[in-house]
Image (tube, rainbow, N blue to C red):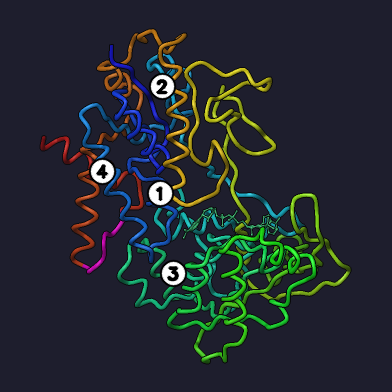
Amino acid sequence: MTARAAVVGAGPSGFYAADQLLKASVAVDLYDALPTPYGLVRAGVAPDHPKIKSVTRMYEKTAQHPSFRFFGGVEVGVDVTPEDLLERYHAVVYAVGTPTDNRLDVPGDGRPGSVAATEFVAWYNGHPSHADAAFDLSCERAVVVGNGNVAIDVARMLVLDPDELAGTDTADHAIAAFAAASVTDVVILGRRGPAQAAFTNPELRELGELARADVVVDPSEVELDPASAAWLESGDASPTTHRNIAMLRELADREPARRSHRIELRFCRSPIEVLGDGADGPVTGLRVARNRLEPGPRGVRAVVTGEQEVIPCGLVIRSIGHRGRPLPGVPFDERRGLIRNAGGRVCEEDGTPRVGEYAVGWIKRGPSGVIGTNKKCAADTVAGLLDDLPRGRLADLPEGGGDAVEPWLRARVAGLVTWSGWQAIDEHERARGADAGRPRVKLVRVPEMLAVADQLRLSA
Ligand code: NAP
C-alpha cells in the first residue's frame, strides 16, 4: 500500500516536506491556493535577489518525482476543507506560512498611506491578490517601521534606480510606479537599538552599496547604552550582531556622497500615532516616542521615555512581523498566531496530538530564519509523520484517495492547475522576459494564468 500525503502550501517548507516524504516512498499531492508554486520565493524574496530565487531549481527536481502531483488554484479552507483532505490521505501537512501582518495598534494606523509591508512586498512581486493595490508614492519621505530583513528589502526597493529594477522580475505595474515615484528619503525605524536589530550582515552591507542612495546613520545612534554594551561584552551576542554594529559605525563615519536618495537608520523609537488631516485623511507624519533600553527578562527591552518627535512623511510601511491565519477545524494558537503543534504534530490545547495532521515552516514555528531553515524544520516534522505512519488512521488506506483525487478536485475547482499547467505559465513568463532581457515577466492575474495553463491542456 502506498502511503499518501497532502501537503498544503507550495512554498519552501511545503517543497522540503514533499521531497522528504517522496524519498521515504510516500506519494505527495502538493496543494496551493495560487496556480503558481513557490510561495514567498516567488512573491516575497526581493526581485533584485535573483540568486536566492534559484533555489526553485531544487523544487523543480522534487516535482519530477513520479509520485508527485501539484494541485494549484485550490484554496484549502475555501474550495476544500482540511476534513476533505483527511478523508483522502493518510496524512495532511500544513505548510501555509504566515500571510497576515502584525498591526502597529496606534491611532491613525488605518489612514491611507499607512500600509503593511506584507501587502507592499506582495504588490511589487506580482501576487495576484495584490495586483490591483495602489500605493501613493508621490510623497518625498517614507518611514519603514521595523528592523528586520523585510524592512531592509522594502527600503531598498523604494530607492533602487529604475535601471536596476528594469532587469528584474518585479511586476510591471510596480516598475512603472517606482519609476514615477517621488520618494527620495526613507527612514528605517527600530524600536530597540543597533545591537538588537534583526537584519543580517549581507542585507545591511547591500544598503551601503546602493547606486543612488546614501545611507545615513547619525553617530549618536550607534553609541551603545550600558545594557547593550554589557551584553556585547558578555560574549552572548552573535557574530552577526557584532558585525552589524561594526558596519553601522562604519556607515556613521561615512561622508555622504550627496546621491539623489537617502536611507536613514534611526533607533530606539516607537510609533505612537500616524498623523494626518481629520480622522481619516492620508498620512502626513509619524509621531514617535524615544525609548531607552534596559535589561529585561528576555534580553534588552525598550522603555518609552517622555520624549517625542514627529517625522513628516506621506507613507508609513509597517514591517513588524507576520501572523498565521487559522484554517477551519485546525487547532490554532491565537497568542502566537500559529497552528498549535508539538514538534510539527498538530495538537489540541491539552497537548493531545491529532492523528494525521502536521505543520511545517512558518505556520509551525513562526516567521523566522532563511529559506534553508525550512529544510531542517520539514525534516523534523516528516520524521514524526513517518514514525506515526504504521499507527492509527495513518495505517488505513482512505477511500477516495489516489486516482480519485483529481476528478474530485476538477468537479469542485474550476481553475485547477496541475504541474504541466504551471510549466506552461513558467515558459510563457520566461519567454516574455527573454524579449525584455529579464528573467521573466510575471502574469499577475489568475484568469491570465489559467488561460495560459488551459492552452496547454487544449493542445495536449
Ligand atoms: P523579523 O526579522 O522578525 O523583524 C521584525 C522587526 O519588527 C524586529 O526588528 C522587531 O523588533 C520589530 N517589531 C516588532 N513589533 C514591533 C512594534 N510593535 N513596533 C516596532 N517594531 C516592532 O521579521 P521580518 O523582517 O518580517 O523577517 C521575517 C523572516 O524572514 C526573518 O527571519 C528574516 O531574516 C527573513 N528574511 C530574510 C531575507 C533575506 O535573507 N534576505 C529577506 C527577508 C526576510 P524587536 O526585535 O524589538 O521585536
Q: Which residue is mark 2?
A: 386
In this view, the residue in front, 211 or 73, is 211
Specify which label sits upstream in the sequence, 4 or 3.
Answer: 4
Amino acid type, residue under disc 1 in the picture: Pro
How far is disc 3 from disc 2 in space, using C-alphas?
Answer: 49 Å
Q: Is residue 340 above or below residue 280?
A: above
Q: Which residues are magenta?
A: 436-442
Amino acid type, residue under disc 4 in the picture: Glu
User: Which residue is drawn at the image coordinates 67% and 60% (left, top)?
Assistant: 111
Amino acid type, residue under disc 3 in the picture: Ala
Say which of marks 3 and 2 sits in front: 2
How far is disc 4 from disc 1 in space, using C-alphas?
Answer: 22 Å
Q: Say which quarter of the image contains residue 224.
A: bottom right
Q: Are dots 4 and 1 in contact, CB under 8 Å?
A: no
Q: Secondary structure at mark 2?
A: helix
Specify which label sits upstream in the sequence, 3 or 1.
Answer: 1
Specify which label sits upstream in the sequence, 3 or 2.
Answer: 3
Determine crowd level at label 2: few under 14, some 14-19, many 20+ residues with C-alpha closer than 10 A.
some
Q: Which residue is mark 4?
A: 60
- What predominant SS class does the magenta segment belong to? loop
Question: What is the x, y in percent for residue 396?
Answer: 38, 7
Specify which label sits upstream in the sequence, 2 or 1.
Answer: 1
Visible residue check, residue 437 = yes
Specify which label sits upstream in the sequence, 4 or 1.
Answer: 4
